[in-house]
Image (cartoon, rainbow, N blue to C red):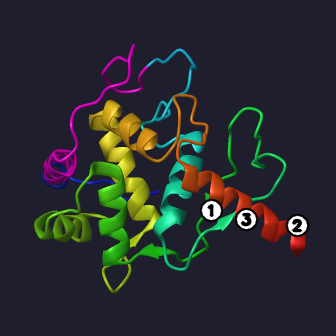
Amino acid sequence: MPREMDDFETAAMQEVFARMSEPRPDTPEPSSRQGRRNGSSSGVQLLDNEGGVTAELEACLKHIFAKYCTPSGKRELSSSTSSNRSTGEASLLTPPPGAYFTGEALDEWAKDTNGAPFSQETKDELIEFLDVTDEGCLTFKGFLQIYQLQTENDEEETWRDLSSHGFDRSLQLVYTRREDADTEDMDMDQATSS
């Protein structure tokens, strides 16, 4: 569990989140309401009653983190996450223990999520306030801290981020881009040929 932040750190992180979301235009999904623990038609919650990340959101965040981390994430081929082409759902990636974002991976994730890399000032603040390696690389724990704080302050921003990475409002990964489907096909071929 991440350590508690004091009021100064919380205010500083809120400012970081405001800058993180600026490059992307405001694109709320239809019939959505702004606010913490948004009641959606699917009944999916992003935060639990104590304000922590739910297991469902954490699974999505593991997948997103694993797309960019070092060492690379692995696709889970268990029955609960196997590909289901009839519904368009895809299996999820999981980051290996000790995985982290390099500076380049952080930029790539930021571009894919918000349309632009972070400023150096934002990167410096992330390193200062979040869990990072001794070399200053963002860990999965730090990644969770980003989304816990962001969701607490602006749940719709988190939903937009999830959508940018192929998740729908029920937190299911759906095929939204051709390269995602191609990657899934390659992974399945490798798994069956092993």
Q: Main secondary structure of the magenta part?
A: loop
Identify residue type, mark 2.
Thr
Residue at x-position 64% and y-position 61% = 183
**Which labelled disc corresponds to residue 187?**
3
Q: Is residue 193 above or below residue 1?
A: below
Image coordinates of residue 177 in percent, x first then y, are: 53, 47
- Is label 2 in a helix, a strand or a loop? helix
**Which labelled disc corresponds to residue 94?**
1
Question: Are dots 2 and 3 in contact, CB under 8 Å?
Answer: no
Badge 1 or badge 2: first in the primary sequence: 1
Q: Closest to the observer: 147 or 110?
A: 110
Badge 2 or badge 3: first in the primary sequence: 3
Q: Can residue 170 be seen from the camera position used here? A: yes
Return the residue at label 2: 192
Q: Which residues are magenta?
A: 10-38
> In the image, 157: left or right of 15?
right
- Cα separation between marks 1 and 2: 19 Å
